Amino acid sequence: MPVNDDVLRLICLFIRTDDGKDERLGASNSINSYRDRLMKSAQAFRALKEPALDALWHTLPSFVPLFSLHPNVVLENGQYVINPTKKIHWGNFDQYALRVKCMLLDKVPPSPEISPYVAEFLTRLRPGQVLLPALKSLHLYRISEKFDGSTLLPVISGSLDTVEVNAVHNKTFVTTLLCYIGQFAPNIRVLKARRVERPAQLLRAIQNLYNLNTLEVENETLNWQWFCSLHSHLPNLRHISLGLSESPIPVPNDSTHEYSRTETPQFKLITLRVSGPETASLVLDHVDPLSLEVLTVKETKPGFNPEAFAELLAKINQLTSLTRLTMEIREVSAGFDVDVLQTLSWMKCRASLEELNLSGNKFITKLSDQTIADLARDLPALKRLYLPTWHCTQGVYPTLESLLLLGNHCPSLQEVRLPLQDLHLPPNHSKFTFSNNSLQTISISLASMFSGNIYSIESMERARNDVLARQVTPQLVEMLYNRFPKLSRIEANHTHGQNPRGYHATQEICDRILGHLNFGHSCTKIVLCITILDELLLEAFHDRTNEGKQNRDFISGVLALGLDDEDVGIVISVAKEDHEGHPSSGYAKSRYILEQIFVE
């Protein structure tokens, strides 16, 4: 029921305070002023009430909160059932049903649970009206065989846009649900089916979903013929993620698999989990190279055939619109001698490629400063670069010069993952003068840390401190600070097979560097607001004497040391902490002045 301003004001008139004053508001504030403020608070609360309710009801973990609002639904013996003798009233139910946009059911239904007959009964009470008219997405996770799927069917409506089914063990439930969706929610655009039984039956169940745009099926039992049937049944499909098993290459003159140019699927995103590169190459043969923007190839069985993998790389090079490429390959069989990075640098899409993710420990055989330099020059639009972080077969690792080369040639770079020999500054680091790079995150592994050399010393702690002292130098911090002004995260990459002590030592190096950088970044930010702070100081201290000037100088000095202007709370917290070394004689006084200004 809406509450108008007059009712709120009347409520506020009955609010009493001791002696008409409130010490928190100051002695000059009258009770009327206090009531006016309370009135504004009530109005603000009312304004926030509806968004809060929307957020609360937006995603439901079960049917209980909504169905229990209906007067005909009662709790008996630990289960909600129908009581048809009560007067039918839909007011509360309809009011909150419109807020429900998502159903997220995980594991078994909660206790007490809704009887599977409740939803069916409520649907019969109003033929032609759906129970959840605004439902957009339905997510089912780890549903056991005990779950009665008939409870879901009455809530399916034409508004449904997304369905996600993950690890459902009821073998008939998924196909039944999808057939029902195809009949009552034909406009569904996104379907994700992970770890479900009988995935081969999915195609028959979804063949009427003509508007389907995104399909993800993680099972690795689908064959090539299943993929070939997708385009004919689902012409609007653009994003697919499939696990395909090995299957014979179709005969070119077989009419079942013969594609004309006009029938080529216009896929924009493809994710493939394959046991061999032959299947991935086969898929790319039947995809329009002008439309594909995102490609991910994941190996499910180690030991890619070298010749077939080289052929796959050649076909990837023909994709002209690719912006993101991911290849997760653990190992290529013996005899593979292809420079993957050099091969990919010939891609037709190299000028527009924004993300390159190469994961694996043995299929990148050549990785050095020179290969990184060539890659950076050929891929100027890179925003994210992820390279394997260990096991370079030739024993040659990039140095810190590679990071500078990437920063110089790829100004939009935001994230990078690299294996590095160490963190020693390259001799020619001063020739790099760029300062506008967008790099925010660096993930590194250090060959000097997981090679085992540092563990031969008797004292592990002493050895680690020696490494830190040698590599985390002021010159290194200054270089990163000047070349990458937006750098906010440095982390060690936890690689398979690496000695855990080497990982922790690398992480300690990263933390120490980041600590120095954060101190420096705050310094640059605060310089920009010194003028504004000085005006604030003039208002707070009208004293133009030497002492007043000294106060302002103290504050400006403390701020310039490294406080962050974006959060006033940090001003106090940092000011109260002792910096390393000996604080200046005026530090305590500066801290007191800061507290007087900002605490209020």
Image (tube, rainbow, N blue to C red):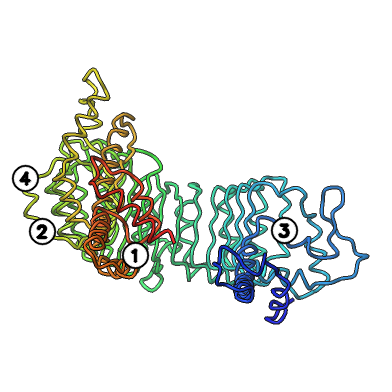
Quadrant for residue 296, please give it.
bottom left
Name the front one of labels 3 and 2: 2
Pointer 3 with pointer 1, Cβ within 8 A: no
Q: Report the front residue among 443 and 566.
A: 566
Q: Residue at x 46, y 54 (%)?
A: 242
Find residue 428 and report its horizontal and vertical position in percent. Answer: 6, 49
Q: CA distance from mark 3 to mark 1?
A: 40 Å
Q: CA distance from mark 3 to mark 2?
A: 61 Å
Query: What residue is pinned by disc 4?
Result: 427
Q: Quadrant of the N terminus?
A: bottom right
Pointer 3 with pointer 4, Cβ within 8 A: no
Find residue 507 and report its horizontal and vertical position in percent. Answer: 30, 38
Query: What residue is pinned by disc 3?
Result: 63
- Labels 3 and 1: the sequence-earlier one: 3
What kind of element bears circle 1?
loop
Q: CA distance from mark 2 to mark 4?
A: 14 Å
The numbered disc on residue 433 is 2
Q: Residues within 10 Å of mark 4 (few under 14, many from 20)?
A: few
- The amino acid on which the numbered mark 3 sits, given as a three-letter code, is Phe
Q: Is residue 377 left or right of residue 247?
A: left
- The amino acid on which the numbered mark 2 sits, given as a three-letter code, is Thr
